[in-house]
Amino acid sequence: MTRPLLLSACIATLMLASPALAQPLPKEAAATISASNEAATRGPSDASLVGALHEFAYERGALYAVQASPQRITDIALEPGETLLSVSAGDTTRWIVGDAQSGIAGNIQSHILVKPNAANLATNLVIMTDRRVYHVDLKSTSGAAMAAVAWRYPIGMTQLSSLPPAPPPPAATAPQPPTFTPETLNLRYRIDGDKPDWRPLSAFDDGKQVYIEMPDNLIEAPPLHVIGDEGLEAVNYRIRGKYYIVDRLFKKAELRLGSGWTQKKVTIIRQTPISAVNDNGGPNG
């Protein structure tokens, strides 16, 4: 089951708006932060290997280093029965972050799936559950990726988490699509370009968000790039079921996958001006 991810660009906005906030830290403070982060970091060499699974010992306040690579998905698995509340990523433009579940009702395990769009990228994840918080340091490389990551927990934590859980809600057999009010939708989008298996079926907006409908049983999730007057623009989006949900309106966007002569590109173009949004937040035509 895929959920919306809680993502924000507020910090960047504040840094630009307030010169006081943009001042660098004193050298001593910066050195202290760097030293504490380094001491708290647990890398691949600190994890036990179970096949391709890197299993860390869970410690409160630890920073877990996870290595990923383009064209590969890294699976970050939580404790069975642990309920995922939210996932926040620092860079949602160049990293694809989603979540899924395995198991059956009463023994559900949550997974966070991450994939970088390129090598030599770095960001972080904050994973919040009903039992604990995980801090993950993500780096991408053109080399080998960590296929799967999990944790082992102190005995006290395991005993606590083994208490009978509250009755679970009915388990969904498939990701639930977003709900729409037809009369509020602007359907005037054009889809141009190549015709790969992942070419969108449609695109529309509700005056606030753009929804891009993808084919059923999508195997590859191409990254989305919004194109503004000055080139590529940062945008937050997430994948829910077979929909890309973009958190703002745009005039033009591209889905790209591959490189060189094998690259496939599909363009999504809004056919009405963005200014054509009424005072109630709904589109006019």
Image (spheres, grey):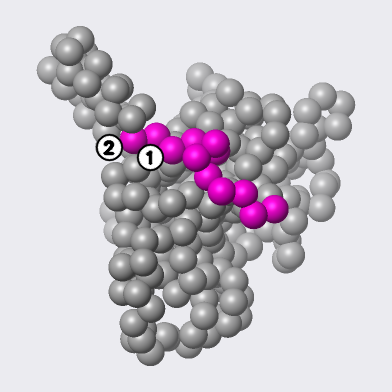
Q: Is residue 41 visible?
A: yes
Q: Are marks 1 and 2 in contact (CB under 8 Å)?
A: no
Marking on residue 10: 2
Indicate left or right for 265 with 55 as reference. right
Q: Is residue 136 above or below residue 242?
A: above
Q: Is residue 226 visible?
A: no
Q: Which residues are magenta?
A: 40-51
Residue ID at (52%, 80%): 107
Q: Quadrant of the N terminus?
A: bottom right
Residue ID at (33%, 30%): 39
Q: Is residue 182 above or below residue 197?
A: below
Work out which residue is located at the far top of the displayed protein and give it.
27
Q: Position of residue 281 (x, y in %)?
A: 34, 56
Q: Is residue 18 above or below residue 144?
A: above
Work out which residue is located at the far right of the displayed protein and give it.
261
Badge 1: residue crowd in 10 Å (few <14, some 14–19, many ≥20): many
In magenta segment, residue 284: no
Residue ID at (70%, 53%): 51
In magenta segment, residue 48: yes
Q: Position of residue 165 (x, y in %)?
A: 36, 84
Q: Nearer the viewer, mark 1 or mark 2?
A: 1
Q: Position of residue 75 (x, y in %)?
A: 59, 53
Q: How far separated are the C-alphas under marks 1 and 2?
A: 23 Å
Depth check: give the residue in front, 169 or 164.
164
Indicate left or right for 209 with 160 as reference. right
Marking on residue 63: 1
Indicate left or right for 119 with 266 as reference. left
Depth check: give the residue in front, 183 or 170.
170
Q: Type of residue at label 1?
A: Leu
Q: Position of residue 64 (x, y in %)?
A: 44, 41
